[in-house]
Amino acid sequence: MAKDWTGNSNSIYKTLGASNHTQEDRQNEDYYATEPKAAEWLLKLEQFDKNIWECACGQGHLSKIFEAAGHDVKSTDLINRGYGKGEIDFLAIDNLEWKGDIITNPPYKYAQQFIEKALQIIPEGNKVAMFLKIQFLESKGRKSLFLTNPPKTVYVSCSRLLCAKNAEFAKMIKGGGSAVSYAWYVWEKGFKGTTELKWFN
């Protein structure tokens, strides 16, 4: 029988190492910087408000792309990494309304909380875009999120985009890249239809 998959040992072991059970230590604050190309693609796929809040900005890899495209970007992070404003706990902010869109790659273990918080504070009709693993679609615990607040569109990257531990992209590429698949999940507040699945890259 012919194989319907092609790959090599690097693909196999990279995938194993990409699981939550990898023996390599995760970054303490879950800092995995997003390749700027991911933001460039997102802006080709969707139209966004003039005002964007990047609430887990890291070293500004996404923010800089949005700024270059003419958006007014509020860049914050819990940890001060030399870009934007540090020591801002997005999940702890109370009584806040943000008149714009929210786009980020959140700390994965808090991704659902980031989504729920973002949808809570933006106006009806505005957007939340999160760069997350394909596996985020799984889990009984997240089922209620998707049923109550379905994404309007999930854009699956057909080519591997990188999230590099401590923003060490060169080291990651030298080590063979990544076997993790990512997608942009885009919510529009108030949307109650059926999620559309699209592919890019």
Image: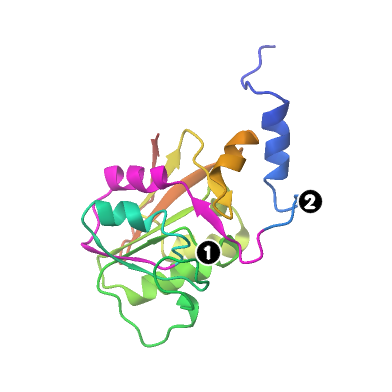
> From what the image shows, is residue 55 above or below residue 140?
below
Q: Which residue is mark 1?
A: 111
Q: Is residue 37 magenta?
A: yes
Residue ranking furthest to the top: 1
Question: Which quarter of the image is occupied by the N terminus?
Answer: top right
Residue picked out by circle 2: 23
Residues shaded magenta:
27-55
Position of residue 37 in the picture relative to residue 5 (left or right): left
- Where, by quadrant of the figure, is residue 126 drawn? bottom left
Taking depth in this image into account, of 113 and 191 the one nearest to the observer is: 113
As helix, strand or loop, the secondary structure at mark 1 comes to helix
The x, y position of residue 116, in whole percent, is: 45, 71
Residue type at mark 2 is Gln
* Among numbered discs 1 and 2, the one appearing first in the sequence: 2
Spatial separation of the CA atoms under disc 1 and disc 2: 22 Å
Mark nearer the viewer, 1 or 2: 2
- Which image quarter is the C terminus in? top left
Number of on-image labels: 2
**Mark 1 crowdedness (10 Å alpha carbons): few <14, some 14-19, many ≥20:** some
At x 37% / y 70%, what residue is drawn?
119
Query: Residue 191 location in percent, x, y?
Result: 31, 61
x then y, percent, for residue 199: 40, 36
Q: Amino acid at mark 1?
A: Ala
Q: Is residue 185 left or right of residue 16?
A: left
